[in-house]
Image (spheres, grey):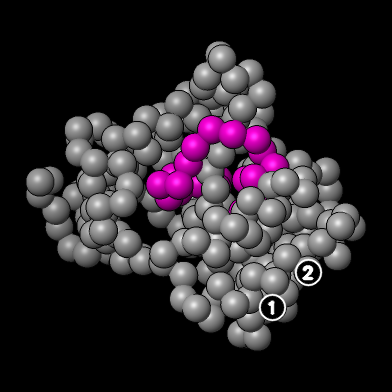
Amino acid sequence: MTETGRLLGSGRSADVYAIDDAWVLRRDREGWGDAAAEGAVMTYVRSHGYPAPRVRPTGSRTELVMERLSGPTLLDAVGDGRVSAQDAGALLASLLRRLHAVPGRDPAAPHARVLHLDLHPGNVMLTPDGPRVIDWSNTEDGHPGLDWGMSAVILAQVAVGGTPLAAAARALLASLLEGPSALTEEGLTEARLRRAANPTMTRQETGLLPAAEELIRRLAAFG
Protein backbone atom coordinates (compact mmCIF):
# COMPACT_ATOMS: atom_id res chain seq x y z
CA MET A 1 0.00 0.00 0.00
CA THR A 2 1.34 3.42 -0.99
CA GLU A 3 2.32 5.74 1.87
CA THR A 4 0.22 8.89 1.85
CA GLY A 5 -0.19 12.26 3.51
CA ARG A 6 -3.38 14.11 4.38
CA LEU A 7 -6.78 13.38 2.91
CA LEU A 8 -7.59 15.90 0.16
CA GLY A 9 -11.09 14.80 -0.74
CA SER A 10 -13.60 11.97 -0.95
CA GLY A 11 -16.06 10.90 -3.62
CA ARG A 12 -18.78 8.27 -3.74
CA SER A 13 -16.33 5.36 -3.96
CA ALA A 14 -12.78 6.70 -3.52
CA ASP A 15 -10.56 8.94 -1.39
CA VAL A 16 -7.73 11.18 -2.62
CA TYR A 17 -4.59 11.67 -0.51
CA ALA A 18 -1.54 13.89 -0.88
CA ILE A 19 1.80 12.20 -1.55
CA ASP A 20 3.91 15.31 -2.12
CA ASP A 21 3.70 18.58 -4.06
CA ALA A 22 3.68 16.78 -7.41
CA TRP A 23 1.60 13.61 -6.88
CA VAL A 24 -1.61 12.38 -5.24
CA LEU A 25 -3.04 8.95 -4.57
CA ARG A 26 -6.62 7.97 -5.29
CA ARG A 27 -7.63 4.90 -3.28
CA ASP A 28 -10.79 2.99 -4.18
CA ARG A 29 -12.90 2.11 -1.12
CA GLU A 30 -15.35 -0.23 -2.85
CA GLY A 31 -13.13 -2.38 -5.06
CA TRP A 32 -15.21 -1.84 -8.22
CA GLY A 33 -12.56 -0.34 -10.48
CA ASP A 34 -9.22 -1.30 -11.96
CA ALA A 35 -6.66 1.43 -11.29
CA ALA A 36 -4.03 -0.19 -13.52
CA ALA A 37 -6.38 -0.23 -16.51
CA GLU A 38 -7.50 3.31 -15.76
CA GLY A 39 -3.91 4.52 -15.64
CA ALA A 40 -3.19 2.79 -18.93
CA VAL A 41 -6.03 4.55 -20.75
CA MET A 42 -5.01 7.92 -19.27
CA THR A 43 -1.47 7.37 -20.52
CA TYR A 44 -2.80 6.36 -23.94
CA VAL A 45 -5.00 9.41 -24.51
CA ARG A 46 -2.32 11.70 -23.07
CA SER A 47 0.16 10.29 -25.59
CA HIS A 48 -2.19 11.56 -28.30
CA GLY A 49 -2.34 15.07 -26.85
CA TYR A 50 -5.48 14.73 -24.76
CA PRO A 51 -5.49 16.69 -21.46
CA ALA A 52 -5.47 13.85 -18.94
CA PRO A 53 -3.24 13.96 -15.84
CA ARG A 54 0.10 12.16 -15.80
CA VAL A 55 0.06 8.86 -13.94
CA ARG A 56 2.66 6.72 -12.23
CA PRO A 57 2.29 2.92 -12.30
CA THR A 58 1.62 1.15 -9.00
CA GLY A 59 0.58 -2.33 -10.13
CA SER A 60 -2.50 -2.02 -7.92
CA ARG A 61 -6.16 -2.43 -8.86
CA THR A 62 -7.27 -0.07 -6.10
CA GLU A 63 -4.59 2.65 -6.00
CA LEU A 64 -3.82 5.19 -8.71
CA VAL A 65 -0.95 7.67 -8.37
CA MET A 66 -1.41 10.70 -10.57
CA GLU A 67 -0.29 14.26 -11.14
CA ARG A 68 -1.37 16.73 -8.47
CA LEU A 69 -3.47 19.40 -10.15
CA SER A 70 -4.23 22.92 -8.97
CA GLY A 71 -7.28 24.97 -9.79
CA PRO A 72 -11.05 24.68 -9.39
CA THR A 73 -13.28 22.14 -11.02
CA LEU A 74 -15.42 23.41 -13.86
CA LEU A 75 -18.42 22.79 -11.58
CA ASP A 76 -17.03 25.13 -8.91
CA ALA A 77 -16.13 27.75 -11.52
CA VAL A 78 -19.69 27.76 -12.86
CA GLY A 79 -21.09 27.83 -9.34
CA ASP A 80 -19.18 30.95 -8.34
CA GLY A 81 -19.58 32.74 -11.66
CA ARG A 82 -16.03 32.51 -12.96
CA VAL A 83 -17.25 30.56 -16.01
CA SER A 84 -20.68 30.91 -17.62
CA ALA A 85 -22.86 27.85 -18.09
CA GLN A 86 -22.78 28.45 -21.84
CA ASP A 87 -18.98 28.47 -21.91
CA ALA A 88 -18.85 25.39 -19.68
CA GLY A 89 -21.13 23.49 -22.06
CA ALA A 90 -19.00 24.50 -25.02
CA LEU A 91 -15.87 23.32 -23.18
CA LEU A 92 -17.41 19.94 -22.39
CA ALA A 93 -18.43 19.55 -26.02
CA SER A 94 -14.91 20.36 -27.21
CA LEU A 95 -13.42 17.86 -24.74
CA LEU A 96 -15.74 15.13 -26.01
CA ARG A 97 -14.87 15.92 -29.62
CA ARG A 98 -11.13 15.93 -28.84
CA LEU A 99 -11.37 12.61 -27.03
CA HIS A 100 -13.21 10.95 -29.89
CA ALA A 101 -10.59 12.24 -32.33
CA VAL A 102 -7.99 10.09 -30.54
CA PRO A 103 -7.36 6.93 -32.61
CA GLY A 104 -9.05 3.81 -31.29
CA ARG A 105 -7.01 1.25 -29.40
CA ASP A 106 -8.34 -1.86 -31.14
CA PRO A 107 -7.37 -2.39 -34.80
CA ALA A 108 -10.15 -4.96 -35.04
CA ALA A 109 -12.74 -2.27 -34.22
CA PRO A 110 -11.67 0.72 -36.33
CA HIS A 111 -14.75 2.81 -35.52
CA ALA A 112 -14.51 2.38 -31.75
CA ARG A 113 -13.07 5.21 -29.67
CA VAL A 114 -11.98 5.67 -26.08
CA LEU A 115 -15.05 6.76 -24.08
CA HIS A 116 -14.82 8.55 -20.75
CA LEU A 117 -18.46 7.87 -19.76
CA ASP A 118 -18.45 10.32 -16.84
CA LEU A 119 -17.45 13.61 -18.43
CA HIS A 120 -19.26 16.32 -16.48
CA PRO A 121 -18.18 19.63 -14.88
CA GLY A 122 -17.05 17.95 -11.66
CA ASN A 123 -14.52 15.88 -13.60
CA VAL A 124 -12.83 18.79 -15.37
CA MET A 125 -10.09 20.66 -13.50
CA LEU A 126 -9.27 24.20 -14.66
CA THR A 127 -5.52 24.31 -14.12
CA PRO A 128 -3.15 27.17 -15.00
CA ASP A 129 -2.09 25.05 -18.00
CA GLY A 130 -5.63 24.50 -19.23
CA PRO A 131 -8.42 22.01 -18.53
CA ARG A 132 -7.59 18.49 -17.35
CA VAL A 133 -10.08 15.62 -17.45
CA ILE A 134 -10.02 13.40 -14.35
CA ASP A 135 -11.73 10.22 -13.09
CA TRP A 136 -11.34 7.70 -15.91
CA SER A 137 -12.71 4.81 -13.83
CA ASN A 138 -15.69 4.18 -16.15
CA THR A 139 -13.78 4.28 -19.41
CA GLU A 140 -14.25 1.72 -22.17
CA ASP A 141 -14.05 1.56 -25.95
CA GLY A 142 -17.17 2.06 -28.05
CA HIS A 143 -19.28 4.46 -30.10
CA PRO A 144 -18.99 8.18 -29.23
CA GLY A 145 -22.78 8.45 -29.11
CA LEU A 146 -22.76 6.68 -25.74
CA ASP A 147 -20.25 9.16 -24.30
CA TRP A 148 -22.36 12.10 -25.41
CA GLY A 149 -25.44 10.37 -24.02
CA MET A 150 -23.85 9.83 -20.61
CA SER A 151 -22.73 13.46 -20.31
CA ALA A 152 -26.15 14.69 -21.40
CA VAL A 153 -28.07 12.45 -18.99
CA ILE A 154 -25.86 13.43 -16.03
CA LEU A 155 -26.46 17.12 -16.72
CA ALA A 156 -30.16 16.65 -17.43
CA GLN A 157 -30.73 14.89 -14.11
CA VAL A 158 -29.45 17.99 -12.35
CA ALA A 159 -31.44 20.26 -14.67
CA VAL A 160 -34.75 18.61 -13.75
CA GLY A 161 -33.86 18.01 -10.10
CA GLY A 162 -35.16 21.25 -8.64
CA THR A 163 -31.90 22.14 -6.86
CA PRO A 164 -30.20 25.58 -6.95
CA LEU A 165 -27.97 24.20 -9.73
CA ALA A 166 -30.90 23.26 -11.99
CA ALA A 167 -31.00 26.42 -14.12
CA ALA A 168 -27.23 26.42 -14.69
CA ALA A 169 -27.31 22.72 -15.56
CA ARG A 170 -30.05 23.28 -18.13
CA ALA A 171 -28.13 26.13 -19.76
CA LEU A 172 -24.97 24.02 -19.73
CA LEU A 173 -26.80 21.08 -21.32
CA ALA A 174 -28.29 23.31 -24.02
CA SER A 175 -24.82 24.63 -24.82
CA LEU A 176 -23.38 21.10 -24.90
CA LEU A 177 -25.96 20.04 -27.49
CA GLU A 178 -25.95 23.29 -29.46
CA GLY A 179 -23.10 22.48 -31.83
CA PRO A 180 -22.27 19.34 -33.77
CA SER A 181 -22.47 16.29 -31.54
CA ALA A 182 -22.30 12.53 -31.86
CA LEU A 183 -25.40 11.98 -29.71
CA THR A 184 -27.61 9.22 -31.13
CA GLU A 185 -30.88 7.57 -30.24
CA GLU A 186 -29.00 4.41 -29.33
CA GLY A 187 -26.46 6.30 -27.25
CA LEU A 188 -29.13 8.16 -25.28
CA THR A 189 -31.11 4.98 -24.60
CA GLU A 190 -28.03 3.08 -23.44
CA ALA A 191 -26.92 6.00 -21.26
CA ARG A 192 -30.27 6.11 -19.48
CA LEU A 193 -30.17 2.35 -18.85
CA ARG A 194 -26.65 2.58 -17.44
CA ARG A 195 -27.54 5.45 -15.15
CA ALA A 196 -30.57 3.55 -13.89
CA ALA A 197 -28.37 0.56 -13.06
CA ASN A 198 -25.63 2.62 -11.35
CA PRO A 199 -25.37 1.33 -7.76
CA THR A 200 -24.11 4.68 -6.43
CA MET A 201 -27.28 6.53 -7.43
CA THR A 202 -30.16 7.14 -5.03
CA ARG A 203 -33.77 6.24 -5.74
CA GLN A 204 -34.51 9.95 -6.06
CA GLU A 205 -31.79 10.34 -8.71
CA THR A 206 -32.99 7.39 -10.77
CA GLY A 207 -36.53 8.74 -10.52
CA LEU A 208 -35.43 11.84 -12.44
CA LEU A 209 -34.36 9.85 -15.51
CA PRO A 210 -37.64 10.00 -17.51
CA ALA A 211 -37.82 13.80 -17.22
CA ALA A 212 -34.09 14.06 -17.94
CA GLU A 213 -34.44 12.06 -21.14
CA GLU A 214 -37.42 14.15 -22.24
CA LEU A 215 -35.40 17.34 -21.76
CA ILE A 216 -32.49 15.99 -23.79
CA ARG A 217 -34.81 15.00 -26.62
CA ARG A 218 -36.29 18.50 -26.73
CA LEU A 219 -32.91 20.19 -26.76
CA ALA A 220 -31.34 17.78 -29.24
CA ALA A 221 -34.44 17.99 -31.49
CA PHE A 222 -34.79 14.30 -32.09
CA GLY A 223 -37.28 11.68 -30.90
Can you name the residue that lies furthest to the top here?
107
Give the residue type at disc 1: Val
Quadrant into which the C terminus falls: bottom right
- Secondary structure beneath disc 1? loop
Q: Which residues are magenta?
A: 128-151
Q: Residues within 10 Å of mark 2 (few under 14, many from 20)?
A: many
| Residue of label 1 | 160
| Residue of label 2 | 215
Q: Nearer the viewer, residue 76 or 205?
A: 205
The answer to whether residue 208 is above or below residue 146 is below
Residue at 36% from the left image edge and 65% from the top image edge: 11
- Callout 2 touching callout 1 (CB < 8 Å): yes
Residue at 22% from the left image edge and 64% from the top image edge: 7
Residue at 66% from the left image edge and 28% from the top image edge: 101
Residue at 59% from the left image edge and 77% from the top image edge: 207
The question of residue 181 being in magenta is answered with: no
- Badge 2 or badge 1: first in the primary sequence: 1
Asked where in the image residue 38 lies, by quadrant, the reply is: top left
The question of residue 143 being in magenta is answered with: yes
